[in-house]
Amino acid sequence: MAITGKAAEDILERIFQPTTKPSARDQAEETLRHPKRLVYVAMSNRSFYWRAHIQKFVLDSGMVPVSPFMLFDYYLMHTVDKDVVREAMNNLLSRSDEVWVFGRLSLGVKVQVGIAKRLNKPVRYFDISDLPVAVMPISEETAQEELRD
């Protein structure tokens, strides 16, 4: 059976036909069928100014960031008791699928890592000393403590 010019044109049209953008409903259905993993972002307040770059890194990695500094700013500009915010942060951590640590380890970050390990959550570490250019994965052994003033 010979391929006619019409059949070839039909195939080419399907290949080069512009794809339609998924509707909001299609996107919602896809999210419900294949939810992305939630990543709790642990970082020292000394790295606060890199929060948007770190959010982008997590999103670019195909995950959904759960970032206290984006949700609660800096303890809601000190308008809410720190213990209330910490409890909220710990609740988010417990609901996340994994914890990613960015930058040096402050006391608060160490506590968050401890909580994650007790909950058997995967913990990954990243060096952010080359931001905004690069975020580099590192091992737990090479993660450094934050220097105290």
Image (cartoon, rainbow, N blue to C red):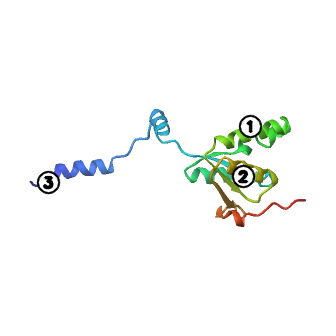
Instruction: Give the residue furthest to the top.
Output: 25
Q: Cα distance, mark 3 to mark 2? A: 63 Å
Q: CA distance from mark 3 to mark 1?
A: 65 Å
Query: What label does residue 3 carry, if any?
Result: 3
Quadrant of the image containing the C terminus = bottom right
Q: Quadrant of residue 106?
A: bottom right
* Residue placed under numbered mark 2 in the picture: 113
**How many numbered badges does the structure rendering display?**
3
Q: Confirm whether residue 134 shows in the render.
A: no
Q: Secondary structure at mark 1?
A: helix
At x 85% / y 39%, what residue is drawn?
A: 78
- Kindly report the distance in space between the C-alpha atoms of the residues bearing marks 2 and 1: 16 Å
Q: What is the three-letter code of the residue carrying label 2?
A: Val
Element at label 3 = loop
- Return the disc, 3 or 1, that comes first in the chain's sequence: 3
Q: Position of residue 24 (x, y in %)?
A: 48, 34
Q: Which quadrant of the figure has residue 22?
A: top left
Residue 107 visible, this angle: yes
How packed mark 1 is, by other alpha carbons closer than 10 Å (few <14, some 14-19, many 20 or more), is some
For the residue pair 43 and 122, the one nearer the viewer reads as 122
Left or right position of 16 against 86:
left
- Local packing at callout 3 (Cα closer than 10 Å; few below 14, some 14-19, many 20+) is few
Q: Name the residue: 57% across, 49% down.
A: 63
Q: Which residue is mark 1?
A: 88
Rendered view: 125 above or below 41? below
Query: Which three-letter amino acid code belongs to the residue tagged 1?
Result: Ala
Select label 3 or label 2 by which is in front. Answer: 2
Q: Amino acid at mark 3?
A: Ile
Residue 77 appears left or right of 38 = right
